[in-house]
Amino acid sequence: MAFSRVALANGLSTRVLDTGGAGPTLVLVHGLANAIEIWDRVRPALAARFRVIAFDLPGFGQASRPDAAYDSAFFVEQLKGLLDALAIARAHLVGSSLGASVIVRFSGENLHRIDRAVLAAPGGFGRETHLLMRPTALPLIGEALGRPTPFNNRLTLRLAVHDPKAVTPELLALTNRYAAVPGSERSFPRTLRTGVGLLGVKERDSFEGLARRLDRPTLVLWGRDDRVFPARQSDRAMALLPRAERVLIDRCGHYPHWEQPEVFVSAVEAFLA
């Protein structure tokens, strides 16, 4: 198991962690402002049964930071490019927040490449999101407000978790280090602005249309104390996804894989068994 640098067909590059092994392939897709390390608490356990691949979405972690739109089409292209670069024809896909939404979008033209899907608190199944997520949509000053400064990073992480102790000094330092990479001042606010407006989550109609056609076994995971996207949005997910199961996790916010790793792993393993 080692980190490697992988070139994508679109000219960008990303950092990849591949555990190897003969088990089924499981690809982890992180959320906004995260990186490979956000999976550290679940990856070793999952690697006992699966070939686990984690990568940095371009714009974050140690991946390229192009001057791009950072919209849904951009991130779908990166996931497809990663699978193509690693010659992965089909895999289980596990996503968190933005990463989970990307999987739903990816399914539109790539359903044949998905075995099963795990969606942890995806955006798109409801308009509501926390008010602190919306100021980046303001004209003129929105991009400045959304820049990943140390203050904003701490605020974002604290919003995402239920237990403040989960915002460890190591996680905060890691987030600040990656946020300081040139280009981050574009990638974070642009990603947020393409998905969230002053009235809440955007482009829901197209997202829900794709969810209706995601005809693969799908596990919907949600923290009951999620303040980014409230857990009641999982009701809409269950109504739309053709073959969905649901697990709601107590004492958990927006990062179930970080806050409740044992519960997360148990649910994923049971679903993929």
Image: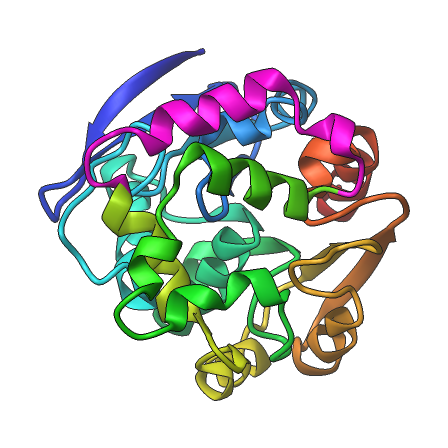
Magenta span includes 223: no
In this rendering, does residue 93 appear at all? yes
Please name the residue shown 88% across and 43% down the image.
251
Image colouring: rainbow
Q: Residue furthest left?
A: 11
Please name the residue shown 15% across and 40% down the image.
12
Residue 203 coordinates in the image, percent (x, y): 44, 81
Q: Residue furthest top?
A: 1
Q: Residue furthest front?
A: 141
Q: Tell me which secondary structure the magenta stretch mostly adopts.
A: helix
Q: Is residue 2 left or right of residue 209?
A: left
Residue 104 coordinates in the image, percent (x, y): 50, 66
Depth check, front residue: 79 or 198: 198
Q: Quadrant of residue 245?
A: bottom right
Q: Quadrant of the N terminus?
A: top left
Magenta span includes 173: yes
Depth check, front residue: 107 or 199: 199
Q: Quadrant of the C terminus?
A: top right
Residue 122 coordinates in the image, percent (x, y): 59, 61
Vertical relation: 34 (above or below) 16: below
Query: What segment carries the magenta color?
Result: 162-184
In this rendering, does residue 76 appear at all? no
Vertical relation: 141 (above or below) 250: below
Vertical relation: 127 (above or below) 268: below
Q: Quadrant of residue 235?
A: bottom right
Residue 150 coordinates in the image, percent (x, y): 45, 32
Please name the residue shown 56% across and 45% down the image.
156
The mark tally for this picture is 0
